Image: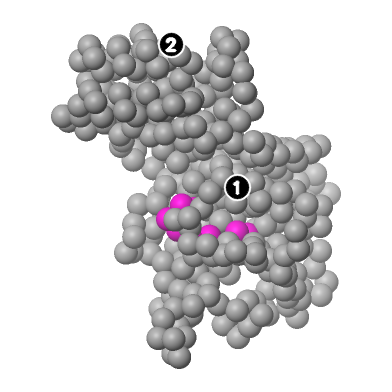
Amino acid sequence: MAYRTIHINPIAARSSRSSVLVIYTGGTFGMVYDPHASQLVPFDFERVLDRLPELNRLDFDITLLTLPEIIDSSNMKPAVWVELARIIQTNYDQYTSFVILHGTDTMSYTASALSFMLVGLNKPVILTGAQLPIGVARSDARENFITALEIAAAVDTPDEPDSLTGGRPMVPEVCVYFNSLLLRGNRSTKRESVQFNAFASENYPHLATAGVRIDYNRLFIRPYQPNQTLTLRTVLDPNVTILKLFPGITQPVVESIVNIPNLRGLVLETFGAGNAPTDAWFLNTLKEAIDRGVLVFNVSQCEGGRVTQGQYQTSTPLLQIGVISGSDITTEAAITKLMVLLGRESDRGLVATTRLRTLLAQPISGEMSE
């Protein structure tokens, strides 16, 4: 597929060996006001330097690639995740890092999905966007974009010139950068729609904070892993769903969701530390689904904390019937992890189901605690 690309060679980048591929998917970031139409319209990236002259002061090459169909992130689909993963794989050897401009509404879903799909990733993939369009005077787009680019291009500079860490990317993983904070992508969740601090990572520390300088929290950044080869998981199974519990939830509601034809995975959003009703009909409905091979993944509705099945009497039955604890995973990471892992296993037999249960219950890309 041919993509529209624009190359920017900043004055300061002429001696640089770093290069960043920016992939524009759509979203609020790239909108400007058209006085003739009296509405916001997509920004023409051919004129990116008019809007962002600061790019000329960066010390690395930048290439902007626009998807053929730019979308509001509410229309994000697994097929676009696959396209993004393949773009990264195709350009993996040509660029040192990647920045994805993305709408905020589903950014954490995309970041989570890519973290599971890009196996052996050893380069930065930074997602960012904006709460206000780039064409608005008070837009947060400029700072988010410029800093995301700088983080993507950052390398670990050792004290000793001959150190083996020289030239390695500072953040070799999928991240979300927004409003001065760099978050692990599959630990992020959108929490704000009207403030600039749109994203949070309640169960994992920030990977970096951008102030006067960018301070990296090296202890919590995934270590660079030499000799890794990037491979993709591009088969995603969409036969998954989310069931959020609430006081008074009825048997017909639960049964209508759990008995969806061809359902293979269910994210069960429970109360507190993984607690749920103990009504016989509720537990029996879940057990029947589990016996059919449906994977039920227990995720807390709380932004912070974790599922500890068996800590309270109201979560012990879930453990007993085979519900899988999601520990401190986010809903975004849980549903995309299910899609990716189920895509690897078309078999619904006992051996495959056991293997999937084991993988769901443990971290495979830093998305949850042990």
Specify whether residue 104 is painted magenta.
yes
Q: What amino acid type is highlighted by mark number 2?
A: Asp
Identify the residue shown where x is 56% and y is 20%. 356
x and y, in percent, of residue 251 in the image: 22, 23
Q: What amino acid type is highlighted by mark number 1?
A: Ala
Horizontal relation, residue 356 to residue 63: left or right: left
Please report the bounds of the magenta region as a residue range.
99-107
Q: Which residue is mark 1?
A: 79
Identify the residue shown where x is 38% and y is 34%. 242
| Residue 228, quarter of picture | top right
Q: Total number of numbered labels? A: 2
**Which residue is at the front of the view, 204 or 330?**
330
Identify the residue shown where x is 83% and y is 49%. 162
- Measured along the vertical axis of the image, is residue 141 above or below residue 311? below
Specify whether residue 114 is painted magenta.
no
The N terminus lies in which quarter of the figure?
bottom right
**Which residue is at the front of the view, 296 or 214?**
296
**Which residue is at the front of the view, 141 or 341?**
341
x and y, in percent, of residue 52 in the image: 59, 80
- Measured along the vertical axis of the image, is residue 354 above or below residue 338? above
x and y, in percent, of residue 258 in the image: 36, 25
Of pointers 2 and 1, the one earlier in the residue sequence: 1
> Do tag 2 and tag 1 residues touch (Cβ < 8 Å)?
no
Residue 291 - label: 2
Identify the residue shown where x is 48% and y is 16%. 293
Separation (CA) of disc 2 from disc 1: 30 Å
- For residue 170, say whether it is visible: no
Label 1 SS: helix
Colour pattern of the rendering: one colour
Horizontal relation, residue 316 to residue 111: left or right: left
